[in-house]
Image (cartoon, grey):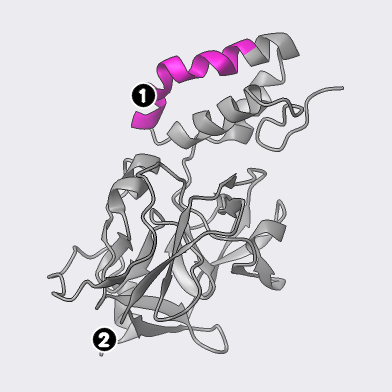
Amino acid sequence: MADPSTAIADLSAATAQEPLNNTVETGPESPPTLFASCFVPGTLVETMRGSMAIESLAEDDMILTRAGATRQWGVRSDEVVENPAPGILYGFNNGPAFFTAGHPFHTTTGLRAIDPHLARQENPWLNVGELRVGHQLLRLNDDKTDYELETITSISRAQSNATSVYGVHLREGLRSYHANGYLVALNYPEITAAAIARQLQTISAQERVKIIQSLNEIKPLFQRFGAGTVIDRLTREANSSAPLAYGDRPEDS
């Protein structure tokens, strides 16, 4: 078995030879749809205040980005990462399904996702391979001071009962965090809905709606810079009957 400390040192290593066994326990098929890299409500994220449900994180929470001899922390930004849940979620080793197909996990052979194509659609700059049975995940040990290696023996898929899935965005620190103890990559784009919202707040509400509704025309350009999901979110808000929030920033009264 590989040494977890060596795995941490080699997180950016090139993808190693793939294992032959890649059996996925099947469930109902779902149509191919782009969904953001996220986790179900209740997924625990390690913070300086302890383990917290991902949907309850607040701006300025200190998020554990790396364990080991020197623990590292990041600062949660004002971006609320909430997206519609896909029809299918995934889990490991007979555990509950808790993540979307496009979320990248740190392994001993680099970043990997069930569907690396989806991961790269959200972040074109990400170097991510396919996550398969036989890969080894980095998971926090019981006292959350270092990592243990967990070999994937099975990958399960299940129908989602969630209406929303959640991610994390940091304004400081490494682009990683821990979801249910697993070291995962922060795959959210640097161009955020909240950042765009701050600029939109400088113009009238009527003009904001017009601008957001026109963003789809230049979405391919935003996708090249990893911001396609941000445009999707702002467009959903503009086309909704609910008050515009612009990335969780309420519209001026």
The picture places residue 145, in percent across and down from the top left corner, at: 53, 84
| Highlighted range, magenta | 210-224
In this view, 179 is above or below 34: below
Q: Amino acid at mark 2?
A: Ala
Residue 164 is inside the magenta segment:
no
Q: Where's the C terminus, which quadrant?
A: top right
In this view, 164 is above or below 201: below
Count of numbered circles in the view: 2
In this view, 234 is above or below 107: above
Alpha-carbon distance for marks 2 and 1?
Answer: 41 Å
The picture places residue 19, in percent across and down from the top left corner, at: 16, 75
Q: Where's the N terminus, which quadrant?
A: bottom left
Q: As drawn, which residue projects farthest toward the right?
A: 253
Q: Mark 2 against mark 1, which lies toward the viewer?
A: 1
- For label 2, the SS is loop
Q: Which mark is residue 2?
A: 2
Classify residue 229 as left or right of residue 247: left
The residue indicated by pointer 1 is 220
Classify residue 14 as left or right of residue 140: left
